[in-house]
Image (cartoon, rainbow, N blue to C red):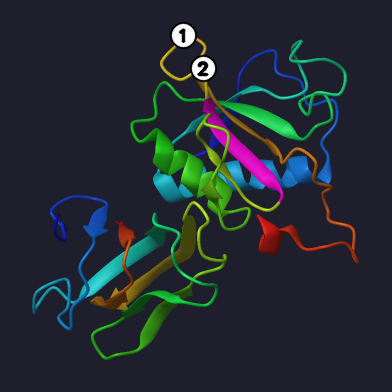
């Protein structure tokens, strides 16, 4: 049975609705791929300031060094959150209508998966606004 | 390339009328199937892939979710069930499958 674990010191001081969706997707991916996954950052850490999605409970880092097929893991997590397409901008990764994930610092010591609510999107979506699924 | 079911996961890039597994190996447990389109050339609603069992019962009919000229798309179907063999009867240009079996 494969599970998700949390690295010592990681803090979940708040979890937004998007955060719960992300955690569910990470857990489902562990089951589907037959891997134990380790969350290495949630609300803790400096990141990029008070408005960083980590501090809002809507971004998580996952250890990548033990994962053989890193693109498969990215696809699988994002696929639990919509229909992924390759992210624009040259950094790699995938986006769905409301979520984003990529391999941060690929090939370096600090390499890890990063998943978050997609920048500029509100989650859950506000009814009556345009549907970004169509305009992605 | 060509279809490769020699290892997990199965890689499929060629459609055909035959079953992926030979006769006598009919039962397969599929965890999930990825439909990967990389050319993004298809209009919304275009059939990317059709997958059935050996009896022709449809398992997946994947339709493009995006307008043409996007960067492609990934559709994942969590099946987690046994199937009576598999036939990939349709694959659009630029679409491949990764079939993740137990």
Foreground pick, B54 / A36: B54
Residue bearing mark 1: A109
| Position of residue B7 in the picture relative to residue A102 (left or right) | left
Q: Which residue is drawn at 48% across and 46% down?
A: A75
Q: List x then y, in percent, for residue B76.
A: 47, 60
Q: Which residue is drawn at 14% across and 81% down?
A: B18
Q: Do the residues labelled 1 and 2 touch (CB within 8 Å)?
A: yes
Residue bearing mark 2: A105
Task: Examine the image and state in which quarter residue B44 appears.
Answer: bottom right
Determine the chain carrying the residue at label 2. Answer: A
Task: Examine the image and state in which quarter residue B96 appears.
Answer: bottom left
| Position of residue A124 in the picture relative to residue B75 (left or right) | right
| Mark 2 closeness class: few <14, some 14–19, many ≥20 residues within 10 Å | few
| Mark 1 closeness class: few <14, some 14–19, many ≥20 residues within 10 Å | few
CA–CA distance in space, label 1 to label 2: 8 Å
Main SS category, magenta section: strand
Residues shaded magenta: A98-103
Foreground pick, B65 / A65: B65
Q: List x then y, in percent, for residue B74.
A: 47, 56
Determine the chain carrying the residue at label 1. Answer: A
């Amino acid at each position: 049975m494969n599970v998700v674990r949390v690295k010592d010191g990681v803090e979940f001081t708040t979890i937004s609705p998007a955060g719960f969706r992300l955690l569910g997707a990470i857990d489902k991916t562990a089951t589907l791929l037959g891997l134990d996954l380790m969350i290495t950052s949630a609300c803790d850490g400096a990141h990029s300031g008070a408005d960083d999605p980590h501090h809002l409970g809507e971004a998580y880092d996952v250890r990548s060094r033990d994962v053989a097929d890193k693109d498969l893991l990215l696809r699988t997590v994002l696929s639990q959150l919509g229909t992924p397409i390759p992210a624009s901008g040259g950094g790699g990764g995938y986006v769905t209508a409301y979520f984003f994930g990529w391999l941060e610092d690929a090939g370096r010591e600090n390499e890890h998966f990063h998943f978050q609510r997609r920048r500029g999107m509100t989650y859950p979506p506000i009814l009556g606004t345009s549907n970004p699924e169509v305009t992605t | 390339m060509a279809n490769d079911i020699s290892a997990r996961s199965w890689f499929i890039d060629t459609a055909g009328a035959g079953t992926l597994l030979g006769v006598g190996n009919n039962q397969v447990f599929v965890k999930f199937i990825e439909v990967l389109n990389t050319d993004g050339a298809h209009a919304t609603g275009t059939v990317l892939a059709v997958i059935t069992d050996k009896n022709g019962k449809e398992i997946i009919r994947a339709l493009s979710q995006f307008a043409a000229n996007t960067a492609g798309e990934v559709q994942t179907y969590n099946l987690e069930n046994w199937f009576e063999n598999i036939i990939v009867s349709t694959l659009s240009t630029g679409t491949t499958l990764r079939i993740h079996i137990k």
